Image (cartoon, rainbow, N blue to C red):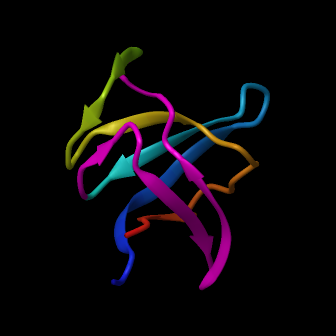
Amino acid sequence: MADIKIGRISHYYDKIGVAVLELTDSLSVGDKIKFARGGEDLFEQEVTSMQVEHEQVQEAKTGDAVGLKTDEEVKDGAEVYKVQ
């Protein structure tokens, strides 16, 4: 099954290792996601926690801006896919 594009990174806070993900699809804690930029896969990770408006959430929906702790540094504009 193909991976589903769920959004794009709009900002990355390198001091705290958190990315802001603008969602175009839903995302839940426990989902496996992949970061890609320029057609090149960067890394994969499981969503262990996320925040919307500084509140911990288990699920986020289309249109939400999600704060997400990342395992590695990721650049603004990177695309995010849900791994099937």
Magenta segment main secondary structure: strand
Decide: is 41 above or below 35.
below
Image spot of residue 9 (x, y percent)? 51, 53
The quarter of the picture where the N terminus appears is bottom left
Q: In this view, does 5 lie above or below 75?
A: below
Q: Residue furthest left?
A: 62
59 left or right of 33 in image:
left
45 left or right of 67? right
Residue that lies at the very extreme toward the top in this rendered image: 55
Q: Which picture quadrant has residue 81?
A: bottom left
Which residue is drawn at the image coordinates 75% and 49% (left, top)? 73
Give the image location of residue 53, x and y in percent: 35, 20
Residue extent of the magenta highlight: 25-53
Residue at image position (76%, 36%) is 14
Question: Which residue is the extreme one toward the right?
Answer: 15
Q: In this view, does 28 lie above or below 78?
A: above
Q: Which residue is drawn at 68% across and 56% down?
A: 75
Which residue occupies 49% across, 58% down? 33
| Above or below for 38 versus 83 | below
Q: Is residue 15 left or right of residue 69?
A: right
Is residue 47 magenta-colored? yes
Horizontal and vertical percent for residue 36? Answer: 59, 71
Q: Is residue 42 magenta?
A: yes
Which of the two residues, 67 or 45, is positioned nearer the viewer here? 45
